[in-house]
Structure formats: C-alpha cells, structure tokens
C-alpha cells in the first residue's frame, strides 16, 4: 500500500481509433459525461494486464468496437490527483463494425475527419496524437520477430543424436504459459503468416497464436539452429526417423539451406508488404533483426538482444520502416 504523500505512476492505454474514409481516414473520438470532454478512447490498466491488451479492452469497452493495433505513438504523460498518468497509445484500426451504445463512461461517439477531430478534442495532448497520426502512414503492416519461449536446458552431449533431441526439446511450464500469453499479445496486431524454426520449442511458441488467428505454421530449416557442428537438416531427419521432413525455400536436394538463407528469407518477408511473424533462436535472431532493419531503411535501436518470449514489432509501409516497438509477455 502506498505511503501517505508517495507519488504514484498510473499506467493506462488507448488508441487513435480510425477507419478508412472516402478520401482520408476518419477518427473516432468519445464524449465522457463525467468530465464533459472529448478524447481518444483509453483507460487504466488492470493489475497484471499487458498494456497492449489494456488498449484493446478499453477501446472495446468505451466504443463497442474491435480493433487491430498499428504503430505506437508518443506516450502521454500528465499529472492527475495522487500521481502521474502515463498513457500508451497506438493507431487502432477498426476491425469490427457495431452500433454504438451509450454507457456510463461514454455517452457519445463521433467519426470525424482529422481536421474536425482536432477542433473537437478538448486536450492539447489528444490533438497532438492526431497530428502524429496524420504525419506518417496510418495504414501499416506488421513484421514480428520473436524469440522462442523457455524450454529448459540443452543437453551437454554432442553429435547428430544429441542435436536431434535438442530439436525436439519441448517448452517447459513457464514457456508453455508464455506461449499462451503471447497468443493474445501477438493477436493484437491481427493475422500474420507464421514462419518458424523447425525446432519444437519455436513451433510450440507460435502454435497458440496460429490457432487463435487461424493461420498455418510454416516450419523452415533456414531458420533452424542446432548445437555443435551438426547440420540442422541431418538432425531433423534423424529426429523424424528418416521419414522425411517438410522443407522450406532455398534448400538443396538433402534439405540443407544455404548458410545465409534464414537472413534472406526474413528480408524477403520484410519487404513483401505482407503481415508476418518469424520465430527463431538466440543464435540467429540478432543477424536476422539487423538485416531486416537495414532492408527497411533503418538501424536497429541499441539495446540487449531479445530475451526468451520477447519480440520486436516492425510497422512497415511498403518496404520502409515507419515505427518499431519491443515487448515481452510481462505487464
């Protein structure tokens, strides 16, 4: 419990809710009778709730509309009684039409062109979000780069059999819980094609998301890493009892990908303009991430490599990077 006089930080989230208009997009703003103001839909985070999910929940509660999140905006920070409020915002494309129903928090909703929305909004901080929205492409496409969840420790032994066992290593209890949580977070960005390393720990990390959005999981040897000097294809064949494996692009007759094929595949997906999710390993993700940022005309922000269950979301317009954000499964 906070001590008397302690300054609190109140976390909240919401969105600049938009839909395509006849020419330019329309923005939805809401009227709150309690304050008699017009603002963007937003609200406080529930205990333990991830801010991505807060944004989607609050928008739905205030407007009745489902959304797909796009690029993030500058955080709004302002003082309120008892502390400081920090509100995270995303571009929120309306993905589910419904008749607005007034409620205790919001008694009116207006769809307006950006200029009209600016005129009606009450607070300068909300007007600045409209300016930020229209300053860059509002329709973006996500590329998600994900490191697999926890799967326990690697075996100390070497060789093809050991590598085959490593490929089959399942998620542990924490990893399985993270995979379930990731499904909801990743679904915030809509339905992506799912491309993964053929290692079970990678496949298991993305299965809950793929099932949630109705996507198939495409296993790629080019993204697969095994310990030692063993070739991934050889280990995978051993794990499958030489029954054959499903291969990906860029493989030779024995299913052996070129050394840089994983990077080429990721770059191909990055510039394709299609929503995509890539799940890979600690060993190959740094090079993949650097190559993808470069292909999109940007440099990767400084920071530690992705931890397990962490992911980058790159918001693209055409083959250019518009914005990037990094998340893990924690609130």
Image: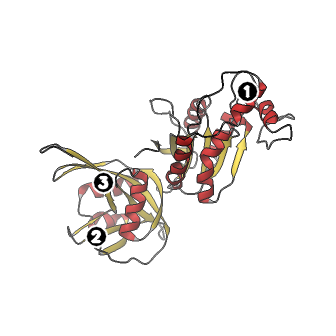
Residue on which disc 1 sits: 162
Above or below for 97 versus 189: below
Secondary structure of the residue carrying numbered label 3? helix
Secondary structure of the residue carrying numbered label 1? helix
Nearest the viewer among 92 and 320 is: 92
Residue 200's tag is none
Residue 53 screen position, x and y as percent: 43, 55
Alpha-carbon neighbours of circle 1 within 10 Å: few (<14), some, or many (≥20)? Answer: many
Residue 242 screen position, x and y as percent: 86, 37
Let me know if residue 67 appears in the view: yes
Above or below for 161 versus 88: above
Alpha-carbon neighbours of circle 3 within 10 Å: few (<14), some, or many (≥20)? Answer: some
The Cα atoms of the two marked residues, 1 and 3, are separated by 56 Å
Residue 304 screen position, x and y as percent: 46, 29
Residue on which disc 2 sits: 105
Q: Tell me: 232 left or right of 320.
A: right
| Mark 1 or 2, nearer chain start | 2
Q: Tell me: 91 left or right of 179.
A: left
- Tell me, yes or no, whether the two marked residues, 1 and 3, touch with CB atoms within 8 Å: no
The Cα atoms of the two marked residues, 1 and 2, are separated by 59 Å
Q: From the viewer's perspective, is the residue at label 1 or at label 3 nearer?
A: 1
Residue 316 screen position, x and y as percent: 53, 48
């Amino acid at each position: 419990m906070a001590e008397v006089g302690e300054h609190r930080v109140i976390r909240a989230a919401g969105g600049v809710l938009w839909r395509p208009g006849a020419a330019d997009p329309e923005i939805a703003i809401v009227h709150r009778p309690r304050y008699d103001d017009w603002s963007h839909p937003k609200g406080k985070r529930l205990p333990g709730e991830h801010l991505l999910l807060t944004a989607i929940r609050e928008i739905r509660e205030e407007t009745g509309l489902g959304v797909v999140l796009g690029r993030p905006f500058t955080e709004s920070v302002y003082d309120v009684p008892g502390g400081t409020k920090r509100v995270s915002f995303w571009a929120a494309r309306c993905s589910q039409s419904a008749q607005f129903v007034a409620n205790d928090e919001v008694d009116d909703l207006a769809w307006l062109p950006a200029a009209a929305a600016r005129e009606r909004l009450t607070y300068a901080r909300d007007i600045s979000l409209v300016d930020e929205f229209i300053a860059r492409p509002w329709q973006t496409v996500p590329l998600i780069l994900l490191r697999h969840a926890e799967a326990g420790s690697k075996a100390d032994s070497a060789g093809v059999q050991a590598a085959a066992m490593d490929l089959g290593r399942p998620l542990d209890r924490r990893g399985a819980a993270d995979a379930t949580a990731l499904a909801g977070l990743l679904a915030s960005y809509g339905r992506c094609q799912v491309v993964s390393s053929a290692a079970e720990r990678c496949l298991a990390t993305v299965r809950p998301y793929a099932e949630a959005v109705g996507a198939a999981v495409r296993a790629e040897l080019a993204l697969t890493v095994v310990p030692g000097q063993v070739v991934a294809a050889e280990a995978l064949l051993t794990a499958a009892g030489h029954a054959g494996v499903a291969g990906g692009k860029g493989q030779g007759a024995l299913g052996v990908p070129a050394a840089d094929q994983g990077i080429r595949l990721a770059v191909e997906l990055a510039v394709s303009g299609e929503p995509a999710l890539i799940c890979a390993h600690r060993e190959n993700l740094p090079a993949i991430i650097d190559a993808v940022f470069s292909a999109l005309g940007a440099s990767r922000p400084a920071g530690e490599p992705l931890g397990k269950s962490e992911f980058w979301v790159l918001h693209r317009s055409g083959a250019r990077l518009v914005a990037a954000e990094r998340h893990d499964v924690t609130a």
